Amino acid sequence: MMNGALYQVKDPLMNMPRRFVLVALAVTVLVCGARAQQDALQSEADRVAVVAAIKPSVVAIFARGGQGGGTGVLISDDGFALTNFHVVQPTGPTMQCGLPDGVLYDAVLVGLDKVGDVALVKLLPKTAGQKFPAAVLGDSETVREGDWSIAMGNPFLLATDFNPTVTFGLVSGVHRYQYPAGTILEYTDCIQVDASINPGNSGGPLFNMKGELIGINGRGSFDKRGRVNSGVGYAISINQIKNFMGHLQAGLDCDHASLGALVTTQTEKTGLGRMVVTSMLEDSDVARRGLELEDEVLAFAGRAVTSVNHYRNVLGLYPRGWRLPLEYRRDQTRKEVLVRLMGVQRRALDDPNPPKEDAPKPKVDNAPKGPPSPAAKYFEAKAGFANYFFNKREQDRLLQAFRRHGDFTSVAGNWTLDGGIRLKKLRTESKARIDIVEEKDGTSAKPVIRLKIDDFPYALEPFKGGQEAAALRAPETSGGLLAAMYVYHRLLTQGAKGFTEFSHGGHEPLYPPPLPGADPTLPGLAALRVDAEVLNTRHGPFLTKWFFALADQKLLGFELRLNENEDPCEVYLSDYRPVDGRQLPHRMQVQYGDGHYGTFRFNSFAMQK
Amino acid sequence: MNLFSLASRRLPCAGAVAQQSFTATVTEVNKKMVKLFGAGGFKGLPSYGTGVLVSSKGHILTCNNHILSSTDLRVHLYDGRFYHAKVLFREPELDVALVKVLDDVDFLPHYEIDKAAAAALAEAGDWVLAFSNCFHIATRDEPMSIQHGVISAYAELRGRRGVFDAPFAGEVYFVDAIANNPGAAGGIITNRKGALLGIVGRELKNTLSDTWINYAIPVQARVDIVREDKTESVDMRTFVKEAIAGTYKQSEKRKNKEDRGGYHGIVLVPNAVGVTPPYVEEVLLGSPAAAAGLRPDDLIVYIDGELVPSIKVFRDIMKQVGPGTEIKLEVQRGSKLKGVKLKLTDLNKVKAAK
């Protein structure tokens, strides 16, 4: 059937006998119809090809024993797969996964993002070096309302042979917000689709028409028709999951983020609204950075905020602890600051029932009967972690790579760093010398860190009794540079052994300040961002976060603080050069709060055994 | 003469790519849609809805439903602009109403009802896109939700909600997209190019099969109405144009159906003023109302989702509720709203039992 008006025949045909005109039109209809049919057949063939290409990566997830279930999708050839938290909640830390080729695998839980409803699991290969068919991760920022999409999964647990069901539909909306109604699961910045999403689809992939993974399906809006597809399904965007991927791979039980500020839309009588700060937590980083009530929030992490949904959406994209730029306006001035995200207040998870029932009702017993799963030996429970086994794995990998830049275990004695410092914004350099030593105190030894800037001496005995917090932050306005040097020495010379708490913290962005003399007209704070992997340590009163380059695990910097809700002493290391076969940073920038303490330039390093 | 050269010259075929993205169409249509907020907010009765702009000055065509009975009707345009609005005219027989933004606005993107109504009716098998703010997913400047589907049939609507028949009784487009969700009424269906085809209807069940249906009232819809004791034919286009001009005359209420109501046992306060609200004066002993927990001084606000503003409306509604039917009332008791389930019985049986 042709769309709309008939083809208007021009002059030559006007003089033709009617018969000819009819034939011409008939041919037009046939050719046109044939073209449309050809198009449709080609589109169908394209769809079939895309489905065939992506199907092998779709995983049917069951609790051990085969009850319950949902879907997942493989994202790496060594067997990591994504799914929903509420799919693995009833299965427990070990589960079974079936692939469309009919093979059933044992699998173990790796990482969790409960609020975001994401879980990372790992399938155990059956042969050494086995490669799993992995989906290609897309960019969910390129997804637009009106695009086509394909969902694959196991709705109603129809697939007893693990062959996923395919549903096809439009992207009905992007950057959608779904409130955590009755659960802790908050779907921020999600993709809304009218492809059929039903119980059992949870945890499964949403693909674009190129076969790229753009989301994980997990939720729908239901009303009078009951808990079956009502034309509205939601998928967690893959870009959000990418932000948490470092955390998930490190076996963490992630926390989502809050700014510590309540932002609401204020409209004059009519017209457009403004996003205004209406309350703030006193101990939040955003308060320390100078945000005040009545300030107008313009953008966060580069995204314009024009409604409360936008605000909630952009916050939901990031893990707690990440540092991101906030743009706001006060009076007529625009300001930009880097803000550290706080955690959200999470309700206790004592509800054993998943909010979206993926199975007909049989109760799942978390303690499987019979011998333990082969996956059990890859699971280690530890408070604050989804699976500490993988955290330990990441720690070991990171330290091993880090040590390639220099093994300091044999120079665990006193250190002296000599050079100069440009304090604050002074143009001239002062002499500087840092000593990290152990001094005999009767029969015992006590650590002492000394700093000398020109003729001014500073010293800290970190474990001297009765010291106030202010003393531990010596020298003044540095936030704790002396203590920072102490833990730095400790990490390099002792590694994990030197700390009472030591864990991998996933990935976080770092913002090394511009070097002195650099162009001051920078294109905003986002341009400074460097993504890093993180270690979190505790020794005595000192909490330290260490940032390592993703590419080669070089130590880019670290932050030292005495407690969670305060500004840390920030140390940035650069200009690495080999000294005695070990890479050492010849430049060290120190910041505290909104102030720059100084930039050190080291000439010599003396390290004793 | 070369017939093939004719055929190859810009054929109006059904699109070069059968699977193109609709992003461009969607963006344009979205600018003509508005989010409405008004009365409601109880389970089954959302306080949000959808509307479509039919003039550059902020005239909005929407479903003639409960949200419009608010004194504070509010609108968000596609870019987040907020306005108060009011109902100008209703036509219950077409199940539509015309709303106007209460501010001086102009140059708003909108549909021309003349053009839409002059187009040919769409047919079964035609592709459609549905636009609405179902489930109140979008706020402020966030775009409408869109769905795809086909017209399954063009046939008579036999719909009901609870015990009430659907207000519109003519022929509608049935679609296979699940378009009729909370808040979707007043949304639109378009063809793939974004041309307006119809107004998304209410959440109704088919009276014959008792299954949920998804339908839209075509822009060409025409009904017979009774006005000033004369029966006349009115179509959607005339309603919109006369409503914008301010000259529309609403149809008279349909004649009451014969009384087939069941026994409830509610005695209301005397109908002193013409629009006395339905306050309960007495609940008869042993009656269904007593069993349901109704009390004197309760004010009946909603019956099965229908607003009950006066005793007359209460009586009209109850005439249609037969014995054995269970209805859900929302009553105001003190400062709270209570849901009450009331199952009517057969008055004859009650009398016989006495």
Image (cartoon, coloured by chain):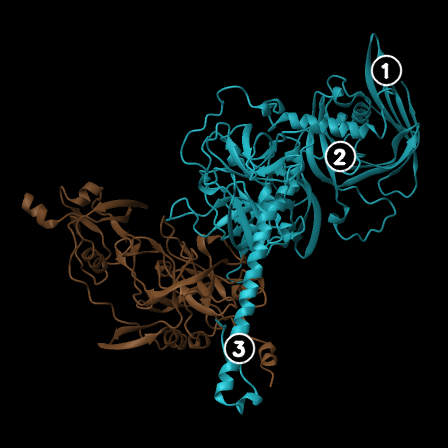
Chain colours: A cyan, B brown
Disc sitting over residue A27 in the figure:
3
Label 1 is found on which chain of the structure?
A
- The secondary structure type at the circle numbered 2 is strand
Specify the amino acid type for callout 1. Glu
Q: Marks 2/3: CA distance?
A: 70 Å
Mark toward the start of the polypeptide (2 vs 3): 3
Q: Foreground mark, 2 or 1?
A: 2
Query: Could you classify mark 2 by the number of other residues whose Cα lies within 10 Å: few (under 14), some (14-19), or many (20 or more)?
Result: many
Q: Which quadrant of the structure image shows residue A341?
A: top right
Where residue B24 sits in the image (x, y, percent)? 58, 64
Where residue B153 sits in the image (x, y, percent)? 37, 64
* Horizontal side of residue A248 vs A533, given as left or right: left
- The secondary structure type at the circle numbered 1 is strand
Q: Foreground mark, 1 or 3?
A: 3
Mark toward the start of the polypeptide (1 vs 3): 3
- The answer as to whether the residues below labels 2 and 1 share one chain is yes
Q: Quadrant of the C terminus of chain A?
A: top right
Q: Is residue A191 above or below residue A95?
A: below
Please name the residue shown 54% across and 31% down the image.
A96
Where residue A467 sits in the image (x, y, percent)? 74, 21
Disc sitting over residue A439 in the figure:
1
Q: Using the image as rendered, state which of residue B15 and residue B266 is in the foreground.
A: B15
Q: Kindly tell me whether residue A471 is visible in this rendering.
A: yes
Specify the amino acid type for callout 3. Val
Residue designated by label 2? A547
Label 3 is found on which chain of the structure?
A
